[in-house]
Amino acid sequence: MDLTQVLPRMEDFSIRDLLPLVRVALVLAGAWVVVRVARRVVSGLRFRLLRLVKPGGGYDLTELEKRAATVSGALQTVISVLVWIGALGLCLKHLGLDVAPLMAGAGAAAGIAIGLGGQNLARDVMSGVFVLLEDQIRVNDVAIVNGVSGVVEELNLRTTVLRDSEGVVHVFPNGAITSLANRTRVYSCYVLNVGVTFEADVDQAMEALKQIDASLRQDPAFAPSMLEPVEVWGVDQFLDTGVVIKARLKTSPGKQWEVGREMNRRIRKEFHERGIALMARWPQMLAAEDPQPEAAAPATGQHQEPAGPKV
């Protein structure tokens, strides 16, 4: 199309020629307002949307807030894309451009795209829909996706975005996710592997663990995060340098590392005062899985998650 038919010459310019530009500005402003209003409406109705998706869910306020943020974020993205596409079409129409050839070209391009990569796109979108509907993970959850552990920053229909403890952002197409584990759903656990020497009294050590846990649950800074008393499972392993006592703390979602670090600190201090000797050397060092940047390796043992079914 000849642009001279759309844009008038300067000598023929008049106020009336500004009308298309005014209409374009109004359309863009209207689209911006619609998007903003839609975002506010979706944000205000997100808890009602959750009840429709999973009536009576039984989640606490924190869990509902996570899922609300995830579902509303995905819905807001879809609405924004549709509104701005419609606004772009109206702007071209008000400028005098025939959008029919453009739509035909876009349809042809879309046909080619569907033929070449539409299957992968459809697979990613369908997988994303099921992740949202089944409430597998939410924004701000700590998850392990395809072996990568991190905090879920974004959960879109096509991709899932994680940020690991080093600040690296990992983007996974939803259709390519083969393994998914949620470390902070409903509740979390911290497994304690406390190594003591062969000379130490293991019964005294296990009793000390229970007393340390009781004192920790009376601390106002940690009591709200601790859901149950410590589970002392007993002597779990015999190593060359001593024995390993295994126990587990049950905490609020995402609080297991904070509570576990404090538990380790108190174990080190209490065992020293009671004369219970900790193992000086571990035959094998395990990598910590804490996704938080400030995480440090436990002082009394190695953090190891209990085996369980994959999500």
Image (cartoon, rainbow, N blue to C red):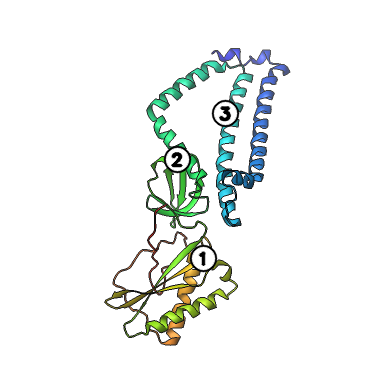
For the residue marked with disc 3, what is the amino acid? Ile
Q: Residues within 10 Å of mark 3 (few under 14, many from 20)?
A: few
Residue matched to label 2: 127
Answer with mark 2 or mark 3, whichever residue precedes in sequence.
Answer: 3
Residue 295, can we see it? Answer: no
Total number of numbered labels? Answer: 3
Taking the spot 68% from the left edge, 16% from the top edge, the residue there is: 13
Which is more toward the observer, 262 or 13? 262
Q: Secondary structure at mark 2?
A: helix
For the residue marked with disc 2, what is the amino acid? Ser
Which is more toward the observer, 193 or 34? 193
Which is more toward the observer, 62 or 98? 62
Q: Residues within 10 Å of mark 2 (few under 14, many from 20)?
A: many
Camera-nearest label, 2 or 3: 2
Answer with mark 2 or mark 1, whichever residue precedes in sequence.
Answer: 2
Residue that lies at the very extreme toward the front in this rendered image: 56
Residue matched to label 3: 85
Q: Is residue 234 above or below residue 62?
A: below
Q: Is residue 258 above or below residue 159?
A: below
Q: Position of residue 54 (x, y in %)?
A: 57, 47
Q: Is residue 88 left or right of residue 288?
A: right
Camera-nearest label, 1 or 3: 1
Q: Is residue 112 above or below residue 232?
A: above
Q: Position of residue 55 (x, y in %)?
A: 59, 47
Q: Secondary structure at mark 3?
A: helix
Which is more toward the observer, 66 or 287? 66
Q: Is residue 261 left or right of residue 51?
A: left
Residue matched to label 1: 251
Determine contact: label 2, label 1, CB under 8 Å.
no
Task: Report, in whole angstroms, how far the alpha carbon at label 2 lies from the one at label 1.
Answer: 30 Å
